[in-house]
Image (tube, rainbow, N blue to C red):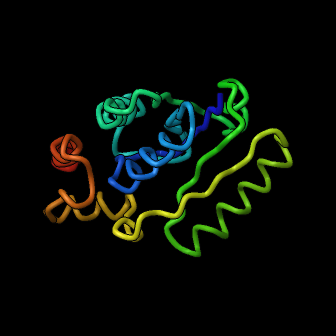
Amino acid sequence: MIKAIYPGSFDPVTLGHLDIIERSARMFDQVIVGVLNNTAKKPLFSIDERVIMLQNVVSHLENVTVEAFGGLLVDFARIKGSNVIVRGLRALTDFDVEMQMAQSNRLVAPEVDTVFLSTSTEYSFLSSSVVKEYARYGVTLEEFVPGSVIERLKEKIAEE
């Protein structure tokens, strides 16, 4: 059985993230969406909120689970018995950063490989940061995030 991990902060989850998750679910026996608890950043949503939002949007995928993690991704992969990390690439600039990370991870954990999936064209510009900025200025969000995330995003922005 091939178990893959798709890591990220998912603050919030976007349609681009969901696209990569759905495609990964077709490629691997099991996909764990790893929600990074990065203490160096101040996310809009708590780790628990991000996990719940993701669980809701992937509930139709039987072979996908969602878990929070902290620390090194390769340590999380080892704990979960995964030897594949999935990363989405939007642009050439992503490739440079992601390649460096993949090579570093490979040195630390040679049993863990990284698989890159190019983002579908309609999501190539999309990031959680862009979505949060659009939400702050009242832009319609249906083209950017799953429907269940829109209200939560509006509520959080209103609380700021």
Residue under the point 52% across and 73% down = 91
- Would residue 50 be found to the left or right of residue 25 on screen? left
Q: 129 and 20: which one is in front?
A: 20
Residue 150 point in image, percent of width and height: 19, 47
Residue 133 appears in the rendering: yes
Residue 43 point in image, percent of width and height: 41, 45
Q: Residue furthest bottom?
A: 92
From what the image shows, is residue 23 above or below residue 25? below
From what the image shows, is residue 67 above or below residue 36? above
Residue 93 is drawn in which quadrant? bottom right
Residue under the point 39% across and 61% down = 127
Q: 39 and 117: which one is in front?
A: 117
Q: 25 and 36: which one is in front?
A: 25
Residue under the point 38% across and 56% down = 16
Residue 62 point in image, percent of width and height: 40, 27
Q: 71 and 80: which one is in front?
A: 80
Residue 42 appears in the rendering: no
- Would residue 90 be found to the left or right of residue 1 on screen? left
**How many numbered badges does the structure rendering display?**
0
Residue 7 point in image, percent of width and height: 55, 43
Image quarter of the N terminus: top right
